[in-house]
Amino acid sequence: MKIKELKDRELLISLIADYLTNYRLVCGLNDMGMNANTYDIHLGDTIFTLMGFGATSKEELIYERFYEYSQKVMKLDIKHQAEPFNALVNEIYEWLCAERRKYENAK
């Protein structure tokens, strides 16, 4: 693996972890009756841009699936369960890479 690819991988994995942490926080605050949607930092959009996705209906389906994956974090105690959290982050990253390959092949 090239150094640039490794750094890109590390960056994307870090962004996915940050996204999931923020997602869990915002959802938790919303569940407590607060309107915390304004605290969403839109890292999902950043991740999709870095992955090279555009804004077509196909990408909307990928983003919806990304959202479904994100909901899995709500079942984890991310403070005390690092291994399942890291596994979810890696699962999402690998899935996004597979979707990107499909997306690029379809062009």
Image: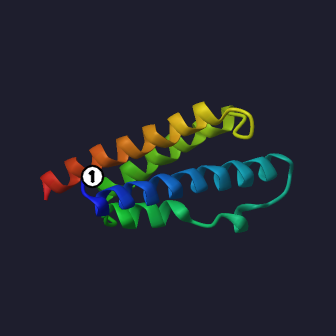
Give the image location of residue 32, x and y in percent: 86, 48
The image quadrant that residue 35 belongs to is: bottom right
Give the residue pinned by disc 1. 100
For residue 94, side relative to residue 84 (left or right):
left
Give the image location of residue 51, x and y in percent: 34, 60
Q: Nearer the viewer, residue 87 or 24?
A: 87
Which amino acid is tagged 1?
Answer: Arg
Give the image location of residue 42, x and y in percent: 57, 65
Q: Nearer the viewer, residue 56 or 90?
A: 90
Mark 1: few/some/many CA within 10 Å (<14, 14-19, 20+): some
Residue positioned 27% across, 52% down in the render: 100
The image quadrant where one finds the C terminus is: bottom left
For residue 106, side relative to residue 66 (left or right):
left
Asked if residue 54 is positioned above or below residue 71 in the image, the reply reads below
User: What colour scheme does the image use?
Assistant: rainbow
Residue positioned 31% across, 48% down in the render: 97
For residue 86, side relative to residue 29 (left or right):
left
Give the image location of residue 20, x and y in percent: 60, 49
Q: Residue furthest right?
A: 33
Asked if residue 103 is positioned above or below residue 53 in the image, the reply reads above
Q: Nearer the viewer, residue 107 or 16?
A: 16
Q: Give the number of callouts.
A: 1
Asked if residue 88 is positioned above or below residue 50 in the image, the reply reads above
Residue positioned 18% across, 56% down in the render: 104
- State the SS at label 1: helix
